[in-house]
Amino acid sequence: MSIKVQEFHKDYERWAWQINNNISYAEDIKMFKLDAKNTSYIFGATDDGYLIHGYFGKKIEDGDLTYLLRLEENPWTLKTNARDKGTFMDAHAFEYPCHGTGDYREPCLIVMDDDGMTTTDLRYVSHKVYGGKPKLEGMPATFAAENKAETLEITCVDKHTGLEAVLVYTAFNDLDVITRSVRLKNNGKAPLNVKRVLSACVDFDNDNYDFITLNGSWARERVMERCRLHHGKQSIDSVKGESSHQNNPFMALVSHNADEDSGEAYGFNFVYSGNFFAQAEVTQHKYTRAVMGINHFDFNWLLEPGEEFVAPEVVMVYSSEGIGAMSRTFHDLYREHLIRGEYKDKRRPILINNWEATYFNFDTDKLIGIAKEASKLGIEMLVMDDGWFGHRDSDNSSLGDWFVYEKKIKGGLKYLVDEVNKLGMKFGIWFEPEMISPDSELYKAHPDWAIQVKGREMTMSREQYVLDYSNKEVRDYVYGMMRNILDSANIEYIKWDMNRQLTEVGSTSLPKNRQRELWHRYVLGVYDLMNRLTTDYPHILLENCSGGGARFDPGMLYYSPQIWCSDDTDAIERLKIQHGTSICYPVSAMGAHVSDCPNHTVGRTTPFSTRGNVAMVGTFGYELDVTRIPQEDRDAIPGQIAEFNKYNPIIRTGDQYRIGNVFEDNMWDAWIFVAKDKSEAVFTFVQVLGRPNYRNRRIKLKGLDPNAVYKNSETGECHSGSALMNAGIFVSTHGDFSSKVIHFIKMS
Ligand code: GLA
């Protein structure tokens, strides 16, 4: 690491920035400056060791930035006026606020000591800077090569208890991204109980923001909501054991005037798949405190002397060019620095999944029938969904019995897979590894393996319980069964489902004083198994799923390059779901299929072409009985596949610009994907409802090279990028739910 030293003089003091690649620090006065691509993040430590936040936003030059800490405007700055420390504590912008010493805003850390006291007071002790980014043990996190990012670790100590907290920051070179996580260690002599440990806090010194979150329910996940911040606390969370259908672990603070293309946006996304908490709090001084981390609700972690706890990572993205640029930064980050494995940069096989085609009513012959027809049309993989194991004919049994249901899978799994392979297709399979049905061999043998509170009724949901994944024995056993299946035939894809939330959260294998750790230990157990699976079977494509999209989060993306977006496959509902999801997740990760009509969830009938055009902005596949759909639809499939193949490289790897917004105007939607080198673009328009006596809609494209000339595949006309973006194109389609795709190719 080369260190440049920039020297300058302040009236009364001489000091210097030590400048590394992304991180500068001034040793004498303990100032830290993290520079990502066009972003700066600044904080410093007072003489007493309090970490004061200074700035987060558009990049600024090094220089005398001590004024940003606003210490001089506070006459009660600790050294000079200890008699009013309280005012200081409740007014200042802190990097990692603790509980109990006068900051009454939301704290990041509450630790109870052996005397039952909950006051915690962390002070700066030391720091180090190094290239690259560390792994988080046993947990997902973004990654970066040494020359792509730089990391700053700030070590703080609570002298009273001996608790050490290491605040870990990474700034990325080529992206406006700063990540944060926290490592706790009990260096004291007595046990500690961590009651809360959030991963990040940013104290903004104004309240001029709107709060954007992604909320919903089953079949309508990640609907974008935006509201003005107001005094008090606005929060979202999950207490369900997974990231949830209801709130995604994402929030953004954006300037009131921010839209897709302009204004400031700060996005926060939690790389975690369990209970989370995210909040923006407007305080008495009209500051805004944004915090994010593991939900402290029903959480406690015993930290014996010498033990460590690692809090997961928060990704923070800054954009000075609107919400669209914020989204594109998330997309680039996740495609390059989170998603892994063989399919990271590859087009995914076009699959056909039998769930909506057959539900539980299938057997070998039916599946082969579907595969035969599908293979003729160009579909590349058959996915056998729920119902192939134990004695499962409906959702009331057999979870945990991961052996083949011979009555349905006649001739065995290998026979079926071989037959499908003979058709030139790959084969994929569904598992729900975290679950156990009361009606199962597994439950008969190990009733204590289900999550439960002894002596209390166990709440059933979808007639199933959840396995205690904090228990390694349970995980090993389930994994053993999965391996038997995976080793028995040529399986090239897994859909990992999770169809219920946690209740009566107790473990028969944890001691009393560790029971409240189960929420988090459960998630760590899931990560452990996904890690084993993806390590042992690197060729298998893993798709996550949770009753549709209840676990669409960055934690899962670390293990699976794609996640089933929603059980709602209706093309019009998907406009909202996929728009909301794209706020922070790339379309390359969005499981999206063409299904049959009337749609099983909403009963709507949409044109087959629109279903294809919407699913194409995702992993693409089919979820229907291809032997039974109308001939006309079947005939359209090869053309749809050809289009998908043609456009997928741009859609999967290019820059996404949202043009329409179905949340604001429910009549239409549009988007464009532009190749990174701006040589071509794919534009999609969807008309929700047809309107009488309106002229063609003028739509302004985005993201093109203004000086280049592009050819419009629909009209054959050539226009400059500046004309297409500033003056727009005229688009018309006829009929409700109609749509079109236009390809723009750069001519010169
Ligand atoms: C969940 C999934 C569906 C399907 C069913 C099977 O609801 O989201 O796609 O796999 O489970 O039970």
Image (cartoon, grey):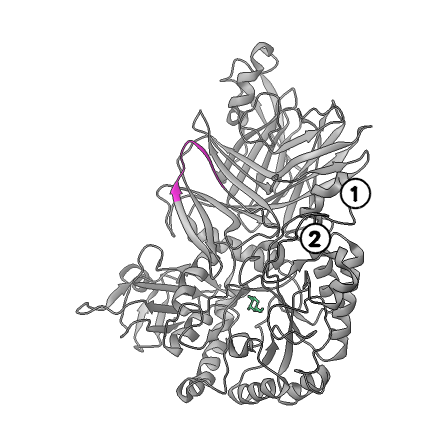
* Horizontal side of residue 692 vs 700, given as left or right: left
Neighbor class of circle 1 (other Cα within 10 Å; few <14, some 14-19, many 20+) is: few
Who is closer to the viewer here, 457 or 19?
457
Q: Is residue 43 above or below residue 376?
A: above
Q: Amino acid at mark 2?
A: Ile
Residue at the spot x=19%, y=67% of the render?
A: 694
Q: Quadrant of residue 683?
A: bottom left
- Distance of mark 2 from mark 1, alpha carbons? 14 Å
Q: Is mark 1 within 8 Å of ligand 1?
A: no
Magenta segment boundaries in residue numbering: 227-235
* Horizontal side of residue 484 vs 252, given as left or right: right
Examine the structure image and report whether residue 232 is included in the region drawn in magenta. yes
**To which residue does mark 2 refer?**
451
Q: Amino acid at mark 1?
A: Pro
Q: Report x, y in % for residue 491.
A: 69, 77
Q: Is residue 533 above or below residue 485?
A: above
**To which residue does mark 1 refer?**
511
* Horizontal side of residue 290 vs 20, given as left or right: left
Examine the structure image and report whether residue 567 is included in the region drawn in magenta. no
Q: Is residue 86 above or below residue 402?
A: above
SS type, badge 2: loop
On-image quarter of the C terminus: bottom left
Residue sitting at the far left? 693
Q: Quadrant of residue 21?
A: top right
| Magenta region, main secondary structure | strand
